Image (cartoon, rainbow, N blue to C red):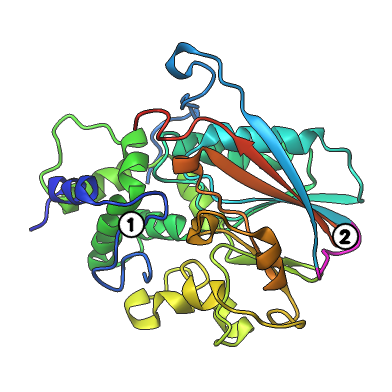
Amino acid sequence: MRTHRDVAGARASREGGEEGEEPRRDARRDEAPTQSGWKTPRRRAMFGPNFRGYILPIALERQRFTLPRAPADDVEIFAVGDIHGRSDLLEALLDAAAREPRRAARRTVVLLGDLVDRGADSLGAIELGLEAGRRAAADEAIALMGNHEAMMRMALDASTPASEALAALETWMVNGGDQTLAEFLRFSVFPADLEDLLADARRSAPAYVVDWLEALRSHWRSGGLLFVHAGVNPDVDLEAFLAAPWNAPLDELGGDRHWAWVRRPFLSAAPGPQGYGGYFVVHGHTPNDLRPDPSPLDQIRRFRLNLDTGSVMTGVAAMGIFRGTEVEVVKARGPSERAAGR
C-alpha cells in the first residue's frame, strides 16, 4: 500500500520547475490526466508586505495588443491567468481592475483556473476568487476549472468512486496539492495511508471550498472570444471538445482531448483567419508557453493569448483587459519562489 509519505517523497525528489505537473507515469498524470472546517475563512500571508522583513511592493507592468476578435459590444472583460496560491498577486490584479475606469455597460471578471496548489496561500486565493466581482467593481465573476481544481475536486468529492478518488489524491499531491492540503488538514495522529488521508481531507475541507469547486465552469464565451483553462484541440470538433465532463477518465480520453489539460496540439497550431470555430482563445495552463521568451504577438497570430506567466516560480501573474479589439495585458510582479529561498 502506498502511503502519504511515499507520495510526499516522490514530489520532493522530482526535478523541474513551475511548468510542472509531475512527469507522466500514467494517464492520470499531467499530460493526461464534508465538511466545514472553519466557520470564517482565514487569509494567510504569503511573501506579502513582511517578506524577509522588508516591504516589497508589487509592481504592475502593461502592454497593449490588437486582436482579430472582440468580446460582446456592451462588455469589458478582465481575465486572470493561473495564480497557484499566490494570493498576493491575485489581490494586486483585482485591485488594479477596480481602479480601471469603466468603459462599457457591463464589466466581467474571468478567472481562468488553477487558483490553487504550489503556492503558500491557496485558500486565500479561493477567498479572493469568491470576492472577485466585488473587488474588481464588476457586474459578474466567472470562475473556470483548471486541471488542478479538477484533481482537487475529484479527490474531495464524495461521489467519486474510491479507487478514482485515491488516484486523484495521489496525482494531486505530487503536483502541488500537498501545499493546499496542508492549509486545512490538522492531525492528532499522522494518517497511516492514503485512505486515511483522503478521509481526513474530506472531513476537513472548508465548506466554502467544496461549494466553490462545484460551481466552476469549463469555459465561457463573449462575442468572438472563448475563455478556457488549457485551450482547445484543433483536431477535435470544438463543441464536442468543450462538452467533455470535468471528471472524464483521462486514461481513456487522453489529456490532449480535454479542455483542462490540452497542450501540444493547441500550442503549436496555426488555425488561420477563422480561428477556432470562429473564436479567439484566451487560456492559461502552460507557463509562458514553456519558452524563456514567449511572444504575445506570435500567440495572437495563432488566435490565442496565454495568461499563465508561471506565478510561483517567476513571481508574476497576468490579467488581460479586453475592450473591443484591444487587450491590455497587466502583469503583477512580486517576489518569486526563488527569491524566497523556497
Q: Position of residue 38 (x, y in %)?
A: 42, 30
Is 251 placed left or right of 192 in the picture? right
* Residue pointed to by mark 1: 155
The numbered mark at residue 324 is 2
Which quarter of the rendering shows the C terminus? top left
Q: CA distance from mark 1 to mark 2?
A: 40 Å
Q: Position of residue 297 (x, y in %)?
A: 71, 62
Which quarter of the rendering shows the N terminus? bottom left
Q: Residue at x 36, y 34 (%)?
A: 183
Whether residue 91 is situated above or below residue 158 in the rendered picture? above
What's the amino acid at mark 2?
Answer: Gly
Whether residue 71 is in magenta: the answer is yes
- The kind of secondary structure the magenta stretch mainly shows is loop
What's the amino acid at mark 1?
Answer: Ala
User: How many C-alpha atoms fall within 10 Å of the one at disc 1: few (<14), some, or many (≥20)?
Assistant: many
Chain part drawn in magenta: 68-74
**Secondary structure of the residue carrying numbered label 1:** helix
